[in-house]
Image: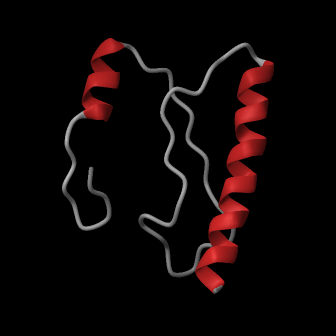
Amino acid sequence: MVWWYASSELYLMYDAAERQVAKHGLKVTRSLVGSYVTSLDMAGCSVTVTLLDEQMTALWDAPVHTAALRW
């Protein structure tokens, strides 16, 4: 049950971040929301925003198989 609350809070933060990005005329095309790799003493969350060109988008969409992330 604790995980669900943490996940819900992260989705609320994502929504707020996406709205801020949209205010600047940008569109989110890829996103990850969740506890993929956490820090033992971290309080809160982090948000990373970057511009993707075609090459970076292809790399983002490439298969991934790590301890923390798979697709």
- For image coordinates 51% across by 81% down, the residue present is 40
Position above or below: 5 against 70: below
Q: Residue at the spot x=22%, y=35% of the render?
A: 62
The spot of residue 69 in percent (x, y) is: 31, 58
Color scheme of the displayed model? secondary structure
* Quarter holding residue 41: bottom right
Q: In this rendered view, identify the residue nearer to me: 71 or 56.
A: 71
Q: Position of residue 60 (x, y in %)?
A: 32, 33
Q: Residue at x 51, y 28 (%)?
A: 50
Q: Quadrant of the N terminus?
A: bottom right
Image height of 53 relative to 13, above or below = above
50 horizontally vs 12: left or right:
left
Determine the image quadrant of residue 70: bottom left
In the image, taking residue 40 as reference, residue 69 lies left or right, namely left
Asked whether 42 or 32 is in front, the reply is 32
Instruction: Report the number of discs.
Output: 0
Horizontal placement of 23 versus 46: left or right? right
Q: Position of residue 65 (x, y in %)?
A: 19, 55
